[in-house]
Image (cartoon, helix red, strand yellow):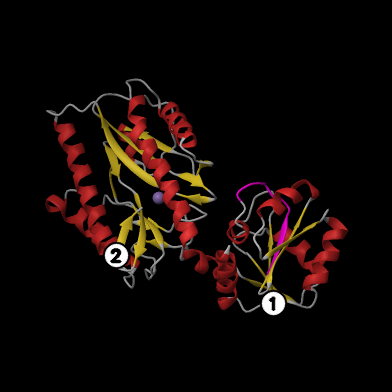
């Protein structure tokens, strides 16, 4: 469990306060998962106090044993019923201190309550210290994301047996989610996108009752969660291609151009590169292909960092400034979208290594 000690050290390299207070509401703060490493339990309304010396978890009796069975060496667990008891424990540890909170997550109402209970000297936003630390993955995290990627790849390899005329996008999405779970996913890392035909021109299309027809795109954008970590991959298939049709030739060409853009971007990735330059490699290729017939049809950023959250803090786009470093994991997902016709996207997750990028 050395990784937990490293995480504490990394947080306090940039965060200059005395302690960080992470409070789960009905939802779980992903920084709570990052620090605890817990993969079982719900831990709603639980409180984690992180200091340079270690962590104190205050949780209900309900989850005390679940916490004890998973706690890293750096953690102490105490039962806490909330209310006055929470106030007593918080003020015992935080009175007069400078305390960090995760402003990306903690709702204002809860913040006001914690402020009153803790009697801290002051509060500062510690969210950047966490998002910066989380950008660089340690070997445990890389292993979990690699498995989350493999679950989706194995699912892509099986899903085509469900491609049949008349199946709806919703039905295919249900099959895909079931297959991912059979392969070990704790859950999908986001709502699976399935888009047939023209719907594939909408990057965030929600599966509906559209039915599959011959010689049409099947775009699947899906991710799995494994030990709290996400993957995010996209494949575009053509169902029962009519290889002599003009439509097929157009669809196939879009696939080839996107595939090539994706691999050119991958080859450009290495530590020290600027993310927006990597985006430009893919965008320039798509915009100039066949004298510009797809110019302006790649309508989103090339990628985003992936971790406990599927969009884990940083982006690769024409606008974002993100200096690539060893240990970062980003999606590489160019696309071409022709409204009224259809769209193509391919997405893989790239680990930035010493010598360049590598698909997980
Ligand atoms: Mn993505």
Range of magenta residues: 39-50
Residue that lies at the very extreme toward the right in this rendered image: 84
Disc number placed over residue 146 in the picture, else none: none
In the rendered structure, which disc, 2 or 1, sits on the residue that comes first in sequence?
1
283 or 146: nearer the eye?
A: 146
Residue 28 screen position, x and y as percent: 64, 52
Residue 18 is tagged as: 1
Vertical comparison of 121 with 46: above or below: below
Q: Is residue 245 left or right of residue 238?
A: left
**In-image side of 346 versus 171 (left or right):** left
Residue 303 vs 247, above or below: the answer is below
Please name whichever residue, 344 or 55, is drawn nearer the observer in this view of the structure.
Answer: 55
Asked if the beta carbon under badge 2 is closer than 8 A to the nearest atom of ligand 1, the reply is no
Q: Is residue 21 above or below residue 302?
A: below
Query: Is 187 a magenta residue?
Result: no
Question: Do labels 2 and 1 touch, CB within 8 Å?
Answer: no
* Residue lying at 52% horizontally and 54% vertically, measured from the top left: 308
Q: Is 16 on the left or on the right of 203, as rendered?
A: right
Q: Quadrant of residue 357?
A: bottom left
Question: Image point 80% across, 66% down: which residue?
Answer: 90
Seen from the viewer's position, the closer of residues 254 and 53 is 53
Residue 318 can be seen, yes or no: yes
**Label 2, on which residue?**
356
């Amino acid at each position: 469990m050395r990784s937990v000690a490293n995480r504490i050290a990394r947080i306090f390299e940039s965060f200059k306060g005395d302690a960080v207070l992470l409070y789960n509401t009905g939802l779980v703060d992903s920084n709570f998962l990052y620090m605890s490493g817990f993969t079982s339990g719900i831990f709603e309304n639980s409180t984690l106090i992180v200091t340079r010396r270690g962590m104190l978890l205050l949780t209900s009796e309900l989850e005390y044993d679940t916490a004890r069975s998973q706690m890293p060496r750096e953690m102490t667990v105490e039962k806490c019923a909330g209310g006055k008891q929470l106030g007593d424990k918080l003020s015992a540890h935080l009175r007069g201190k400078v305390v960090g909170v995760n402003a990306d997550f903690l709702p204002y109402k809860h913040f006001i309550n914690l402020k009153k209970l803790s009697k801290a000297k002051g509060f500062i936003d510690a969210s950047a210290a966490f998002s910066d630390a989380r950008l660089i993955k340690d070997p445990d995290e890389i292993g979990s994301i690699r498995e989350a990627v493999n679950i989706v790849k194995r699912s892509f390899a099986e899903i085509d047996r469900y491609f049949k005329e008349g199946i709806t996008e919703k039905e295919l999405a249900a099959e895909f989610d079931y297959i991912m779970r059979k392969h070990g996913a704790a859950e999908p890392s986001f709502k699976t996108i399935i888009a047939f035909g023209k719907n594939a021109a909408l990057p965030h299309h929600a599966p509906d009752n559209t039915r599959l027809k011959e010689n049409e795109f099947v775009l699947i954008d899906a991710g799995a969660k494994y030990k709290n970590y996400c993957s995010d991959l996209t494949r575009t298939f053509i169902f029962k291609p009519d290889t002599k049709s003009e439509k097929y030739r157009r669809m196939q060409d879009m696939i080839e151009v996107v595939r090539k853009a994706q691999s050119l971007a991958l080859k450009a990735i290495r530590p020290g590169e600027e993310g927006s330059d990597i985006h430009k490699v893919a965008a320039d290729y798509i915009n100039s292909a066949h004298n510009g017939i797809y110019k302006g049809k790649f309508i989103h950023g090339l990628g985003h960092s992936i971790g406990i959250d599927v969009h884990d803090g940083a982006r690769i786009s024409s606008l974002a400034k993100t200096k690539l470093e060893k240990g970062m994991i980003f999606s590489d997902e160019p696309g071409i979208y022709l409204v009224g016709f259809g769209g193509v996207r391919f997405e893989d997750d790239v680990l930035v290594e010493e010598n360049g990028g590598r698909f997980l």
